Amino acid sequence: MSLRILVTFCASIALSSCFLKPYHMDVQQGNYVDMEMIAKLKPDMTRTQVRFILGTPLIADPFNPDRWDYLYIDRRAGRLKAVRRLTVYFEEDRLKRALSDAPVEPAPSQQRASR
């Protein structure tokens, strides 16, 4: 009798684990940078002004101090949802250019003019 209970218990545990899925947390890592923040960047801004707008860079390369990299990774339920990159270049401690892989949306004034 006890063997039958043990076998039934083990079988129920084994079958129930087939239907259980582990919980995956939503993970957001890095610096979230949106289009409004990028639009505030202007050429010849100081490093302090750029840091005020974008925050501290996730990656500051010690071998290239004139480049800051901002990286944002969003994982939902264990799956990669979004990856955004923004690289900011300085020359003589002034902003020279910013490159982003975020989709470029036209400004509201340009949207009205194209209609």
Image (spheres, rainbow, N blue to C red):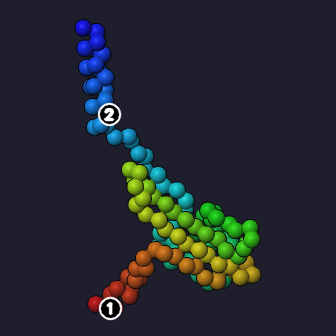
Residue 50 sits above or below residue 8 on the image: below
Residue 1 seen in the figure: yes
Residue 16 is left or right of residue 49, and the answer is left
Which SS class for mark 1?
helix
Q: Determine the residue positioned at 45% across, 58% down.
A: 74
Measured in 3D between alpha carbons, the distance from the residue under mark 1 to the one under mark 2, in whole angstroms, is 57 Å
Q: Determine the residue positioned at 48% across, 75% down.
A: 101
Residue 45 seen in the figure: no
Residue 28 sits above or below residue 9 on the image: below
Q: Determine the residue positioned at 41% across, 45% down.
A: 24
The percent coordinates of residue 42 (x first, y second) are 59, 81
The percent coordinates of residue 71 (x first, y second) are 55, 65
- Find disc 2 in the rendering and name its residue: 17
Q: Amino acid at mark 1?
A: Ser
The percent coordinates of residue 84 (x first, y second) are 49, 68
* Tag 1–tag 2 contact (CB < 8 Å): no
Q: Determine the residue positioned at 41% across, 51% down.
A: 78
Residue 35 tag number:
none
The percent coordinates of residue 54 (x first, y second) are 58, 67
- Find disc 1 in the rendering and name its residue: 114
Q: Which mark lies nearer to you, 1 or 2?
A: 2
Q: Quadrant of residue 23?
A: top left
Q: Quadrant of residue 88?
A: bottom right
Which SS class for mark 2?
helix
Residue 99 sits above or below residue 30 on the image: below
Q: Amino acid at mark 2?
A: Ser
58 or 34: which is nearer to us? 58
Residue 68 is left or right of residue 115, and the answer is right
4 or 53: which is nearer to us? 4
Residue lying at the far top in this picture: please name it.
1
Q: Quadrant of the C terminus?
A: bottom left
